[in-house]
Amino acid sequence: MIAVENRDKVRVAKIGANKLFEVEYNTRQNMSDQELIDLFDRLWLDKIERLVLNGKLCEAEEVERRLPDKFHSFIDPQQEHRSFHYRNAEFIAQLLPQDNSQYKLTQLWRVASSDEHPKTLYINFSSVEERERFASLAKSLSSNDEQLGLRLVRNFMNLHPGYEAFDEDAP
């Protein structure tokens, strides 16, 4: 089990990545502390806690390498770090070991991009609604959002001589 203090629930729910929460960032800024705690608890208890517990252990040096400089002062090498994927995004949780094989969550970061996946391009939409409209468009075209996104990028690249895309994924 992973304990999370209410102040950390509020902080994570208020400023956390849109990929983590299904409520827009701007909306979360106007929510009360109790609403933010409830939002965090629903997501945490339903999905995220299990993903963190089953996540891949990471050394502090790897976490530092994969996160922007602005987060480095929050990385504690004495704590445990676990990476996990949720909604096609990667996250890293920082956990303080407690008694009886339990933990306390102290940080939860989204990994925006990674040298671990050099063929991957991450795209942030302006809103969850815009992201959902794109997924709906892809479905209406008998595709999925990743396939449509790749097709659009390749078509754009092919419009510019010298930057032509490959027809298929390279191995």
Image (spheres, helix red, strand yellow):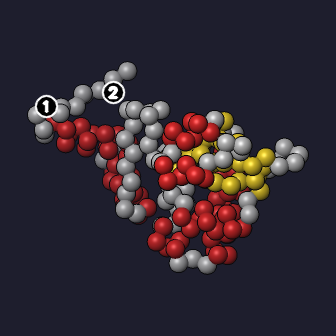
Q: Secondary structure at mark 1?
A: loop
- In the visual, does 138 lie left or right of 161? right
Q: Nearer the viewer, residue 125 or 3?
A: 3
Q: Residue 149's spot in the image, x, y percent?
A: 32, 44
Q: Is residue 73 visible?
A: yes
Amino acid at circle 2: Asp
The quarter of the picture where residue 127 lies is: bottom left
**What residue is pinned by disc 1?**
162
Residue at disc 2, secondary structure: loop
Q: Is residue 47 visible?
A: no
Q: Residue 110: x and y, percent?
A: 53, 50
* Amino acid found under the numbered disc labelled 1: Gly
- Outermost right residue: 100
Residue sitting at x 73%, y 59% = 4
Q: Which residue is mark 2?
A: 169
Look at discs 2 and 1 and give the one toward the viewer.
Answer: 1
Q: Position of residue 64 (x, y in %)?
A: 55, 42
Query: Observer-nearest residue: 121 or 94?
Result: 94
Looking at this view, is 97 or 53 the one in front? 97
Q: Residue at x 60, y 62 (%)?
A: 12
Q: Kindly identify which numbered label has been placed on residue 136.
A: none
| Residue visible at 64% across and 54% down in the picture | 107
31, 146: nearer the viewer: 31
- Where is residue 103? Give x, y as percent: 78, 49
- Split into 4 quadrants, where in the image is the C terminus? top left
Mark sitting earlier along the chain (2/1): 1
Rendered view: 72 above or below 36? above
Residue at (68%, 55%) from the top-left corner?
106
In three-dimensional space, the C-alpha distance between marks 2 and 1, rounded to whole angstroms, equals 18 Å
Number of marks drawn: 2
In the image, taking residue 69 as reference, residue 148 lies left or right, namely left
Crowd rating for badge 2 (residues with CA inside 10 Å; few <14, some 14–19, many 20+):
few
